[in-house]
Image (spheres, rainbow, N blue to C red):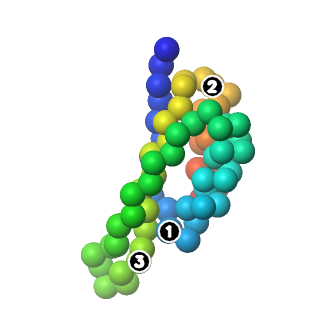
Amino acid sequence: MNIQHVAGVIEQTEIERLRRLIFRSTKGKSFMYVQEYEDDDETRRKRSVYIIVFWDGAHIREKIQKVCDSF
């Protein structure tokens, strides 16, 4: 068994949309962890770091990558 992960940064307003898309595309066979943070630059943008953990398989990896690339 091989566990893989995908990580990235996204705007906090887009987190729920990403969660729904990942859940639907993987049929609930993945785990998503999100941690919020604020940028230290002058814009003070609120972003979140996400990590998606899943059992390795070419089909599920392609689906997750396609969803993440759309953001």
Closer to the chain start, of discs 3 and 1, is: 1
Q: Residue at x 61, y 41 (%)?
A: 64
Q: Which label is found at residue 58?
A: 2
The residue lying furthest to the top in this view is: 1
Left or right: residue 1 versus residue 27 is: left
Callout in the foreground (3, 1): 1
Residue 4, position as x, y percentages in the image = 47, 29
Does the CB distance between marks 1 and 2 fall below 8 Å? no
Q: Which residue is mark 1?
A: 12
Position in image of residue 52 (x %, y %): 50, 42
Q: CA distance from mark 1 to mark 2?
A: 29 Å
Q: Is residue 35 above or below residue 64?
A: below
CA neighbours of label 2 inside 10 A, class few (<14), some (14 to 19), many (20+): few
Can I make out residue 20 in this image?
Answer: yes
Image spot of residue 12 (x, y percent): 50, 68
Percent x, y for residue 30?
57, 36
| Mark nearer the viewer, 1 or 2 | 1
Q: Earlier in the sequence, mark 2 or mark 3?
A: 3
Residue 70: image quadrant is bottom right
**What is the C-alpha distance between the residues marked 2 and 3?**
34 Å
Residue 63 is at least partly visible in this image: no
* The C terminus sits in image quarter: bottom right
Q: Is residue 43 left or right of residue 68?
A: left
Q: Amino acid at mark 1?
A: Gln
Name the residue tied to disc 3: 45
Q: Residue furthest left?
A: 40
Residue 13 appears in which quarter of the rendering?
Answer: bottom right
Q: Residues within 10 Å of mark 3 (few under 14, many from 20)?
A: few
**SS class of the residue under badge 2?**
helix
